[in-house]
Amino acid sequence: MPRQPITLPPRSGGHDAPVLSGATRRITVIGANGAGKSRFAARLVADLGDRAVNVSALSAIYDSRGGVSDGTASGIDALFARLTERSPLVRRDLPTRFERLVALLIDEEMASLFASKYGVGMAVARPTGLERLVKEWESVFPDNRILLESGQLRFARVDDDGNDRYAPARLSDGEKAVIYYLGVALLAPEGTVMVVDHPSMFLNRAMVGKVWDMVESLRPDLVMVYVTHNLDFMTSRARRGDAVTVWVKRYDASDRQWDYELLPPGGDVSEEVYQTVIGARKPVLFIEGDGVNSIDAKLYPLVFREYTVKSLGSCNKVIESVRTFNDLTALHSMASIGIVDRDRRNEHEVAYLRRRGIMVPDVAEIENILMLEDVVRAVASHYGRDDEKAFARVRRNILKMFSTELEQQALLHTRHRVKVDVEHCIDRKFSDITRLERHLSALVRQVNPREFYNRMCRDFRRMVDDGDYAGVLRVYNRKSMLSESNVAGLCGVPKPDKETYIRAILKILRRGGPDAARITAAIKKCFGINGKQKDKVLD
């Protein structure tokens, strides 16, 4: 049966509502939060009547109204009501749409088995909807199995010993979402318009495209309408030849009309669309830390005010996110950068990261940034202390601390260097195991950890002898530095401890003024940024 044309909801500004031909198979509705795209989708479902079903994993799993089946139901509830009427054994009071969908699939399967065995009733064509769902779901989650036991769905791990069968309630939201999406698609009548709210909801980023490609492949007769603000997902759909993208800008509640336009085919997104949908007017700065309790998340938004700062946790996530974000040039014209701690990286490693948009400070870690000379002086000055005397005592304490564990710090740097060199040395192809063994046996001589260690010890002793405070901060990794150096007490901070010292710096930065400017300049200088470079961080 050929697909029917679709008339989109009313359009403001005196424009006629577009009519999409039956050749359109994918419609992606995008828009910023609050623009009215969910209302747009709801109006589309209402206008299409029995031709459309509205699909939301969030409401399917958590909305307790899933049991609605009276004559006032519409969309997905109307579909479930019609199917339930044909399947009197399915309970009408199941609390969620997800549970109702599972019951309908099981009922179809059991009816088919009964008809096949006893010749009573109408057999369902094989494979049944449940069989098709099981095959596709297990391809998405290959370590899991779906079983039908005594008329109930049960789940198990592939390596299960037979004792751990569990009910659908124990599935993750993502696992339930895939079952729901596949199930609705398999139960929908031919030619249905399937309107999906937030198609990436609960799904791992890597599997979103795969899941919806699977749904579209299972039911090529359906028209898929995706409501999202995920531009990456939108692009993956819009590049198909039978796709239309609708950009919803705003909703006029008084006239019940929408300001929207159809975007050019191909999936490319203009800067205007990107900025409106994403809502980010600043470039993005990815940082380490948890986003709540880390020093990074508290400090960097106050220093790099020209950026939207996002915490990602590990340094590897920062590096990968900068690469991924900057690769999406079709979606935006903004650059992103990242910050990772220097730790024990050498100049070659630091230069490599900086070429890839990752800023690395000239100190070992975030705590050391708060020990920069001008930061210490600014805090001391703010609390009425002689900043020169305060810093001199802080400097003396740090050098003394470093000198007492100089050899241990040299060993830590040596371990890091050995790890990097060994990974580099064995990252090559070997024609046989003998060649690999010979290569490994020669590694100690090639890497020569003792020579590196001795050199580190000499360099570190020279820093202490020369009073090279900046050099020590560059190589000294010690989380307790803020406490053990007594920097808070020497600067006159009330209740002199680490946390109070950190809060003092943040307070100064929030209030602004000369001391805040001095701290900001010191930290940016630590990243190689001066006042003239603030708009060209990576130049």
Image (spheres, rainbow, N blue to C red):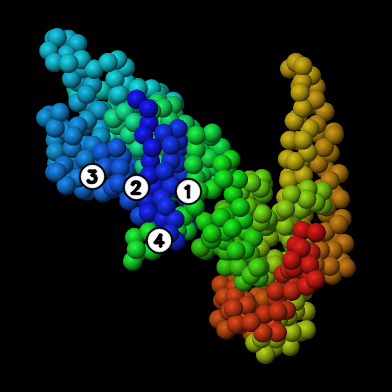
Whether tag 3 and tag 1 are in contact, CB under 8 A, the answer is: no
Residue 208 image label: none
Q: Secondary structure at mark 2?
A: helix
Looking at the image, tell me whether mark 4 or mark 3 is earlier in sequence order: 3
> Between residues 127 and 138, which one lies in front from this camera angle?
127
Residue at label 2? 44
User: Marks 4 and 2, Cα distance to the nearest angstrom?
Assistant: 14 Å
Label 3 crowd bin: few (<14), some (14–19), many (20+), radius 10 Å = many
The total of numbered circles placed on residues is 4
Residue at label 4? 251
Instruction: Give, as a three-letter code, the residue at label 3.
Output: Ser
Percent coordinates x, y for residue 1 in the rendering = 34, 25
Residue at label 3? 74
User: Marks 3 and 1, Cα distance to the nearest angstrom?
Assistant: 24 Å
Residue 246 image label: 1
The answer to whether 207 appears left or right of 150 in the picture is: right
Instruction: Give, as a three-letter code, the residue at label 1.
Output: Val
Q: Which residue of the protein is positioned furthest toward the bottom in this rendering?
A: 384
Looking at the image, tell me whether mark 2 or mark 3 is earlier in sequence order: 2
Q: Secondary structure at mark 4?
A: strand
Q: Which residue occupies 29% across, 20% down?
A: 128
In which quadrant is the C terminus drawn?
bottom right
User: Marks 4 and 3, Cα distance to the nearest angstrom?
Assistant: 23 Å
Q: Is residue 343 visible to the viewer in this orientation of the structure?
A: no
Whether tag 1 and tag 2 are in contact, CB under 8 A, the answer is: no
* 532 vs 250: above or below: below
Whether tag 4 and tag 2 are in contact, CB under 8 A, the answer is: no
User: Marks 2 and 3, Cα distance to the nearest angstrom?
Assistant: 12 Å
> Between residues 22 and 248, which one lies in front from this camera angle?
22
Percent coordinates x, y for residue 76 in the rendering = 26, 41
Q: Which residue occupies 43% across, 59% down?
A: 14
Looking at the image, tell me whether mark 1 or mark 2 is earlier in sequence order: 2
